[in-house]
Image (tube, rainbow, N blue to C red):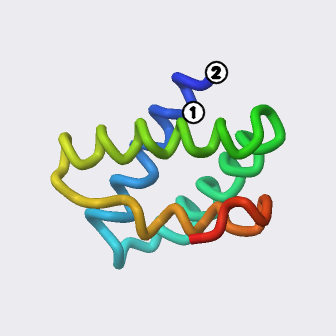
Amino acid sequence: MDFMLEEEMIDLLTLCLQNPASPEVPRAKERIVEIGKDLYADGGVDAMENMFFALENRIKEEIGKDPLPLRSLWNGNTDQWYY
C-alpha cells in the first residue's frame, strides 16, 4: 500500500511543482491532503515523516525541484506536523 501511495504522491507532487498553473493542481493538492490524513491515521507522524523523506529525495533526483513547500498541505493532521 505504501508503495502505491508513494508513486501516486510522486505523480501529484511532480505535477504541482512542474505545472503550478495547471487547472489540475487544486485537485492534486486535495488528493495530497487526503493521503496525508490516511498516513497519519495508519502510522502517525512517523509515517508522514518517512513518506515525505522518501518523496523529497526522489523528486530532487528525478526533476531537480524541492517539494518541501508542499509538505504544509499535511498541516492540521496533528500539532506535531506544522510547516
Q: What kind of element bears circle 2?
A: loop
Q: Which residue is mark 2?
A: 1
Q: Quadrant of residue 5?
A: top right
Decide which of 29, 64 is in the foreground and name it.
64
Pointer 1 and pointer 2: residues touching (CB < 8 Å)? yes
How far, Cα to Cα, is label 1 from label 2?
6 Å
Q: Residues within 10 Å of mark 2 (few under 14, many from 20)?
A: few
Decide which of 20, 77 is in the foreground and name it.
77
Measured as percent of width and height from the top left, residue 76 is found at: 76, 68
Residue drawn at x 49%, y 45% is 52
Measured as percent of width and height from the top left, residue 1 is found at: 64, 21
Q: Quadrant of residue 77?
A: bottom right
Q: Is residue 32 left or right of residue 43?
A: left
Residue drawn at x 41%, y 36% is 54
Q: Quick one: quadrant of the C terminus? A: bottom right
Q: Which residue is mark 1?
A: 5
